[in-house]
Amino acid sequence: MRPMRKTSRQKDAAWALEVFDKAPFVTVSMSRQDGTPYGLPLSLVRSDELTFYFHCASEGEKIDCLRHSPIVSLSAVSKCTPKYEEKKNNFTEYYHSAIAIGKAEFVEDQYEKTLALRLLCERFLPQYMDHFDEAIARSLDRTTIVRITLTEPPVGKSKP
C-alpha cells in the first residue's frame, strides 16, 4: 500500500465507502492493451468493506481491458454543489468524493452471481424485487458479473 498524505479535509475509509454507496454511478477506470486509459460510469453495489459488483455484457471494451489488466480505480461524487460566495466574492464548489484501487475478477459461481444481482436490484429497483427470481431464471447464464476487491483503503474528501 502506498502511504497517503493526509489533508485536513480527508475522511476515513468508512466515510469514503458511504460516498460510494450514495453515488448513483461510480467511474471505473482501467487500462487498454496499448496502455491508454479507459474509464466509464457504472452502477456498482457494495457487499462489504472490500467488495463491489457490477454486471455487464460478456463482450466489449471493458471486458477486454479487465482481461488484459484487472487493476482498476474507482471514483465517485455523491454531492456536488457549485456556489458563489458573495461575501468573499469567490466561486467554489462543495463536494463529497471518494477514490479506491481494486482488482477486478469475473464471477463464475452461480450463487455469488445471484447474490450480486440481488444486491444491485435491491439498491436500484427495490420496488420490483417480486420479479427478481423470474428474471434470474431467464438471464443468469448470459449475465457477466465482475467483482472488484479493494486492494487499498478507500479515501474520501469533502468540502462542506
Image (cartoon, rainbow, N blue to C red):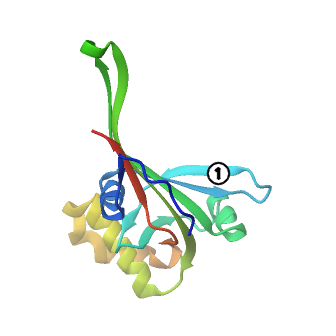
Viewed as shown, does residue 143 lie left or right of 112? right
User: At x 26% / y 13%, what residue is drawn?
Assistant: 86
Q: Position of residue 3 (x, y in %)?
A: 54, 63
In the orientation shown, which residue stands out farthest toward the right? 34
Q: Position of residue 24 (x, y in %)?
A: 35, 50
User: At x 59% / y 50%, what residue is drawn?
Assistant: 39
Query: In front: 114, or 30?
Result: 30
Instruction: Decide: few, some or many residues near mark 1? Use Cα within 10 Å; few <14, some 14-19, many ≥20.
Output: some
The quarter holding residue 91 reads top left
Residue 93, compared with residue 104, is above or below; it is above
Residue 51, compared with residue 64, is above or below; it is below
Residue 9, compared with residue 11, is above or below; it is above
- Kind of residue sitting beneath label 1: Tyr
Check disc 1 and report the residue beneath it. 38
User: At x 46% / y 65%, what residue is drawn?
Assistant: 54
User: At x 30% / y 15%, what residue is drawn?
Assistant: 88
Viewed as shown, does residue 37 lie left or right of 13? right
